[in-house]
Amino acid sequence: MQVNDQNYVDMAEKVIIRLKNKKDRKGRNIPMVTTSKLRNLLTMTADIHNEVMSQTEEKLEGRITSRIEYLRVRFLYEAGREDSVRDLVEEAEIIPFLKGINGNRENYLLFSKYMEALVAFHKYHDGREN
């Protein structure tokens, strides 16, 4: 199911619940991404969000689309560094979502709201700060 304005909150909660209940081969819980790591990813997203909000055209400016591409690189980098981030990026389908923005203002704003919802549900269901 594709994330949209009507389901992004429910989709984010489902992602976090699946990650919270994820087990290894021996049945032990796999630690979720930490709140601080997730908030760092949200901060990068929010910086771009602020620029997007100041633009009125539906097609994003080249420098903003460039920043979104760099954001995708940062998500991939962080996912490569930590398995918990990789689990989040894969479960939440963040990379395909970022690719699907295609320079569209509303698509980016939806992505930003989805990231906020992921952080909120992470805090609600787990809340580890580490």
Image (cartoon, rainbow, N blue to C red):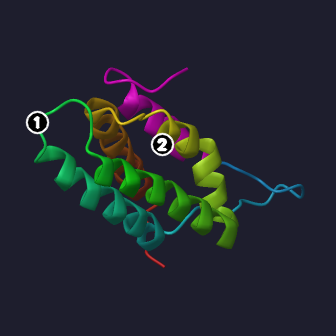
> Residue drawn at (32%, 45%), measured in percent from left and top?
112
User: Which residues fall within the magenta stretch?
Assistant: 1-20
Q: Secondary structure at mark 2?
A: helix
Q: Position of residue 79 (x, y in %)?
A: 63, 63
The quadrant in which the N terminus is found is: top right
Q: Is residue 16 magenta?
A: yes
Q: Position of residue 38 (x, y in %)?
A: 44, 63
> Residue drawn at (82%, 57%), measured in percent from left and top?
24
The extreme right residue here reads 26
Amino acid type assigned to the residue bearing label 1 in the image = Thr
> Residue drawn at (51%, 69%), measured in percent from left and top?
34
Pointer 1: what residue?
A: 56
**Front one among 36 and 79:** 79
Pointer 2: what residue?
A: 98
Task: Classify 10 Å Cα crowding around label 1: few (below 14), some (14-19), many (20 and above).
Answer: few
Q: Is residue 31 visible?
A: no
